[in-house]
Image (spheres, grey):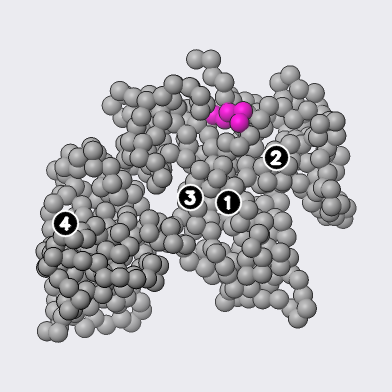
Amino acid sequence: MGKKAIGVSLLVFTLLCFVFPGATAAENGTIAERKALLSELAIQYDVPPEIVLAIAYQETQMRQFDENGDPILNADGDGGIGIMQVTMSPSELEQKGIDEQRLKDDIAYNIEVGIMQLLEKKAWEGRLLPSFQQVTSPAILEGWYFPVLAYNGLEQRNDPNRSNRTYQDQIFATIESRALLRTNPPSSFEVTYNEGGNIMRFLEEQRNLSILKKQRTESRQMFQEGEIVFTFHPEHEAMNLRSEPNTSSSFEKVTHAHPFTVVSGPYYDNNLNNLFAFYEIKSLDGTQTGYLASSYLHPGEISIFPDIQVTNTEMRSAVAMLEARGSLSGYPDGTFGTNIPLQRRHAAKILVEELELSLPAGFESKATDHEDNTYMLIAEAHGILTPYSDGTIRPRDSFRRSQMALVLTRLFGEDFTEPTREVSFTDIDSSFSGFEAINRLAYNGITKVEGDAFRPNESVRRGQFAVFLARVDERVANNE
C-alpha cells in the first residue's frame, strides 16, 4: 500500500546493536522511526507511549545526537544524557550496572533506561509519592503524573503551588497539544517541606488521591489487533478516516460513536509535532476501512441502538461514553429506550456507577421502601436521593426534571459557572421552589430551553439524562 509511516509491529529492535535503516551509529534516524521505537519500548514495559513520547519531545525534541553527531548532553551540566536525558550520578550508574558510554551512543538503550527510571519512580507511589486509589491500570495517563514529576525531580520547582511551569504539567500539556488528548492531571496537591528545605515530602495522609473514572484518560496507543474501539473526540463533530496513515492522504468522514475493529498499527508519521499514532481500522460490517488518528479512537465496546438517530451525534456520543464506562446499558431487545421515562432507581444506578460510590459501613436507611436496592441505599447514604416527608424514597417513581436539576446541582454545582442573571422560562419563575438549581443548569448550558417551558414535573427520559450528564462533564472540563 506504499505506507509512508512506520508501523511498530513491522520493526525489529535489538538493544545490543540497534541502528536505524540507512543511519550510522551517530545519526538519529527518521522522526517516524524514533517515534515508533519510543512507542515499542514503552509498550514493552507497559507504559503509555504518550508519556514516553512527550518526555522525549520535551527533553530533546526526540533526538539522541546533535547536528554534529555528538550525543546530546544537558547544557546545564546536571548529567542528562541522550534522547531521554537520563540523569544519574556516577555511583548510581555503577550501582545499577548502567553503561554510561552506551547511554550516549545507543538510542534504544537510552530510551529503555529512561523508561526503567520512570518505572522506578512509579514504584514510589504510596510511599514517597501520592497515588490515585482507583487507578489500577498502567494505561491510565493520569496515573503517571507523579512518576513524571519525580523523573525530573522532587524539587519545589515541580510543585504547582509554588510554580506555574512544572515539568509534569508541561509533559501533560504536550500530550494535550501534540497527542490531541484531553487529560485531567491534578491542578494542585498537598505537600510538605522540611524547614528551609527544597525537596517535596508527602505525608501518609497526603498520598491517597481520588480521580473519577470519567476523568481518567486511557492510552490511545496501546490498542491490539482485533480489539473493538469506537470513534469519539470531544472537540470534533466528525473525523477523517484516511487512505494512508498520515495527515495528507485522502479521507472520508466518520462521526462519533461508531464501533470499529483494530486491524493493525500503530503507525507513526514524520511530523515531529504529531505525537499521535494511526491505526488501520475496519467497521464491524466491513463497509468502511482506513486509518484513523489514535486520538479519535476510544477503548470499549458499544452498541448501535436503532432508537437513537444516526444524526443525533450528541446523544449517540453521550450514551456511548456511559456504556463504555459500564454505567448504563440497553434493553434485551437491542434498543436503548431513548424516550422511556427514567426511574429513580435507574438514575441512582447511573450516578453511583459514574461516581464509583460504595455503601458506608454501618449505614442505616431511613427510607421505608428502598426494596433492598443497593444503588438506592448508596444514593441515600451519599445524599443523592433522599426520602420524602412520608419516609418513602420511591425507587420506581419517574425521575422528574426538577429533581434532576437539584441532584446534578448538588453533585456538580461547585464546578459550574456562577449565574449572573436569571434565565427566562415560560412555565416557572424565581418563585418556584427549585428555581435556583434549574437556573444554574440552564445558565451553564446543561439544559437548553431558555425562553421556553422547562416542564419541571415532567419525567426525564433515558436519552435526555445521558445528554445532561455529558453536558455536565463538558462544562466541568471547560471550567477546570
Q: Which is in the foreground here, disc 1 or disc 4?
A: 1
Instruction: Give x and y (percent) for residue 336.
Output: 19, 47
Kindly state the secondary structure of the residue where label 4 is placed.
Answer: loop
Kindly state the secondary structure of the residue where label 1 is placed.
Answer: helix
In three-dimensional space, the C-alpha distance between marks 1 and 2, rounded to whole angstroms, equals 15 Å
Instruction: Tell me the magenta residue range.
Output: 267-271
Q: Bin the neighbour count of mark 2 within 10 Å (Cα to Cα): few under 14, some 14-19, many 20 and up.
A: some
Residue 303 falls left or right of residue 289? left
In three-dimensional space, the C-alpha distance between marks 1 and 3, rounded to whole angstroms, equals 9 Å
Q: Bin the neighbour count of mark 4 within 10 Å (Cα to Cα): few under 14, some 14-19, many 20 and up.
A: many
Look at mark 3 in the image and give the residue it sits on. 182
- Tag shown at residue 173: 1
Given residues 395 and 433, the one toward you in this image is 433
Kindly state the secondary structure of the residue where label 3 is placed.
Answer: loop
Instruction: Give x and y (percent) for residue 459.
Output: 13, 62
Look at mark 2 in the image and give the residue it sits on. 61
**Mark earlier in primary sequence (2, 3):** 2
- Tag shown at residue 284: none
User: Residue at left 34%, top 71%?
Assistant: 420
